[in-house]
Amino acid sequence: MKMLTVFIAIGSNIEPKKNIKHSLELIRTIPKFTLIQESSWYNTSPWGITQQNNFINLVIKGTTELSHRDLFKALQDIENKLDRTRILQNGPRTIDLDLLLYANQVIAEPDLVIPHIGLLERDFMLIPLIEIAPSIPHPIHQTPLKDLTHLIKYRQILNRIHIKKHYYK
């Protein structure tokens, strides 16, 4: 199988710096996956349940030979290793790993929709993605991501956390 480019959103509001760093370490161990680039980290207000800690969110770029299903399973396994619980929808979480884009594919399965359903609605997904891949076309709209910010419904980014961007090889 050829290498495909993928983008993954990462978020946490329970010990976020520790859990995000740990998730990145675990992501780098996924077989047939190479981490290429990491966006800046963003301080983000919670959505849905607002009485909880702010989140830190970022997006990473990687390449993989894994199927979308195998990559999704690997990300869920990492969430489980980091004690992700799904008691309250939009509640606090140790880690949230969302597969935003899988090459230029459109996938609609009961438990996985790509491009991610919130990608164009939530600034904390789209803005970090644009930071590292502004010209990538949205698989459905066939328009560069940087030209789709007018579709954002929920603006939750409070500020960029000035953590050095990492480039991997």
Image (spheres, rainbow, N blue to C red):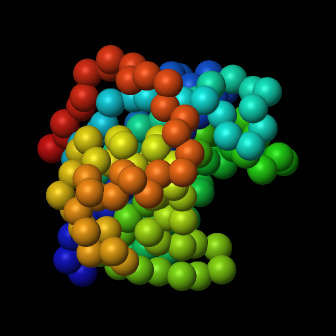
Check the image and report above or below for 6 versus 107.
above
Q: Which is more toward the observer, 73 or 135?
A: 135
**Can you name the residue that lies furthest to the front here?**
150
In this rendering, position of residue 166 left or right of residue 48:
left
Whether residue 165 is visible here, answered yes or no, is yes
Q: Position of residue 97 (x, y in %)?
A: 53, 50
Check the image and report above or below for 150 versus 159.
below
In this rendering, position of residue 59 left or right of residue 158:
left
Whether residue 63 is visible here, answered yes or no, is no
Residue at (47% x, 80% y) in the render: 107
Q: Position of residue 51 (x, y in %)?
A: 79, 27
Q: Quadrant of the C terminus?
A: top left
In this rendering, position of residue 5 left or right of residue 15:
left
State the image quarter where residue 103 is shown: bottom left
**Can you name the residue that lies furthest to the top here?**
162
Check the image and report above or below for 76 versus 90.
below
In this rendering, position of residue 115 left or right of residue 33:
right
Check the image and report above or below for 52 versus 143.
above
Residue at (38% x, 64% y) in the render: 101
Q: Position of residue 141 (x, y in %)?
A: 33, 74
State the image quarter where residue 164 is shown: top left
Q: Quadrant of the N terminus?
A: bottom left
Q: Position of residue 84 (x, y in %)?
A: 69, 43
Residue at (69% x, 23% y) in the render: 53
State the image quarter where residue 137 is shown: bottom left
Question: What count of labels does the image hold?
Answer: 0
Residue at (25% x, 28% y) in the render: 165
